[in-house]
Image (spheres, helix red, strand yellow):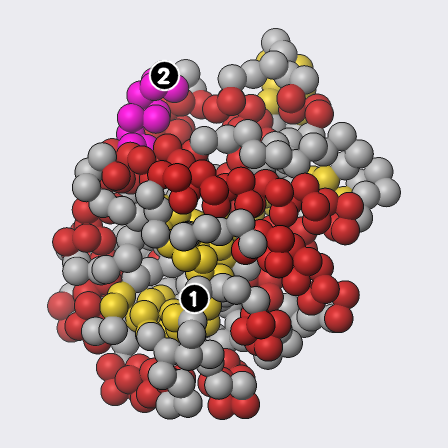
Amino acid sequence: MTTTIIGFPRIGEHRELKFATQKYFKHQITADELNATAATLRQQNWRAIQDAGIDQIPSGDFSFFDTTLDTAFLLNIVPRRYRELGLSPLDEYFALARGYQGAAGDVKALPMKKWFNTNYHYLVPEFDQDTNVQLVGNKLFDEFKEAQALGITTRPTLVGPYTLLRLARFVDGRRPADFVTSLTNAYREILGRLNDLGAQWVQIDEPALVYDQTDADRAIFTDLYQGILAGKGNLKVLLQTYFGDVRDSATTLYALDFDGIGLDLVEGATNLDVLREHPFPDDKTLFAGVINGKNIWKANYTDTLKVLGQATSNTTAPVVLTTSCSLLHVPYTLANETKLPEQEKQYLAFAAEKLTELHELD
C-alpha cells in the first residue's frame, strides 16, 4: 500500500500565515512579501510531508482563507459588486473574504457558514444572473509548478462542482441546474491544463456527498461528472469525500469513470456497511481514510488495521492509506508543545505526527 493525506495545515508551524496577513491588512508589508511568505509555507509543507515518507503529496490545499473561496475565485464566481471595485486580484479576493471599505467603494464580505460539522468556516459562493463561470485563475496551476520546481509532483486538489452548488447561495432566480454546463466545461479545462503540465492525479473534493441525496441530486452529480471525466485524458481523478458516509451515492460513484474514491472510515463508519453491501470496484483505487484528521489523539493501530481489513475484505482494488479529512483541523506539530507533560504528550498526535502514523501503518 501507499500513503497520502487530503490536506495539511497552512497556518505555518509558528502561525506565520496569520501574522503575515495581519501585517498586510495593516499595510505593513507588500503583496509581494505576503506572497513570498505563502510560498515559503507551501514549500515547507511539501518538504515535511515528503520527509515523513508520504507517497502522494497534495497541492492546492494552501489558502489565505478557505479552498471553497479559492475554487470560486478560480472559476470567476465573483459577484459584480466586488469586480466593480477595480482592485488587484489579491485585494479583490480579500474583499470577498473580509469586505472592503476604501476609496474604491464599500462592500460587505460574503457570508460565512460552518464547514460541515467542524469549527472551521467557509465563504458562501454566490451565483446570480451575472455569474459567468469560466476558468480565469492560475493559483492551482502555479502551485503545482512551484512544487515541480522542487522536484515534487503533487496531486492538485480543489473543491468539486457538486459541493460548490450544494453550499452556494442562489439569487435572482438562479438555480443549480443553470450552471451545470458551464461548470462542466470549466472543470474539463482544469483537467486538460493539469494533464498538459504533467500531473498524474487530481483530487476533487465532494464532501456534500455525505448529505442525504435525492434522485435529483444524483442526477445533477452524474450530469456534471459524465462531462468532466470525458475530458480527463491521461490524468487520474480522485473523488474525495469526508465527514460522513456515501450510503446514498456509492453505486453512482462506482458507475462513473473515477480512478480513485476517497472514503472517510472514521466519521463515516457506515461506509464499512456500504462496502459490505456494495463491494468496492476492483478497477478503481480505494483511498481509505483511516487516520482521524479532526482529533488530536494517537491512533490505536490495532483498531485502525481492523477497520482497514473490514474495508478491503471484499475487494482486490489497490488501496492508499489516507486521513479521514484534511489535517487542517488539528495543530501543526507536538514538537512545539514544550509545556505539556510527557505523560500527556504520549497520547497525542497533531498533523506532523499523523504523517508518521500513516507511514508506520503502510
Q: Position of residue 317 (x, y in %)?
A: 37, 78
Packing grade of label 1 (10 A; few <14, some 14-19, many >=20) is many
The foreground one among 252 and 27 is 252
The residues bearing labels 2 and 1 have C-alpha atoms spaced at a distance of 41 Å
The foreground one among 170 and 187 is 187
**Compared to 174, does 323 lie above or below?**
below
Can see residue 16? no
- The residue carrying mark 2 is 30
Q: Position of residue 66 (x, y in %)?
A: 49, 43
Secondary structure mostly seen in magenta is helix
Dot 1: element: strand
Name the side, left or right, on which 22 lies relative to 357.
Answer: right
- The residue carrying mark 1 is 260
Can see residue 112? yes
Indicate which label's residue lies in the foreground, 2 or 1.
1
Where the N terminus falls, by quadrant?
bottom left
**Compared to 7, does 26 lie above or below?**
above
Q: Position of residue 272 (x, y in %)?
A: 47, 85
Q: Earlier in the sequence, mark 2 or mark 1?
A: 2
Q: Which residues are magenta?
A: 29-39
The foreground one among 46 and 353 is 46
Q: Is 26 contained in the magenta span? A: no
What residue is rendered at 56% in x and 54% in y? 230
Q: Residue furthest top?
A: 103
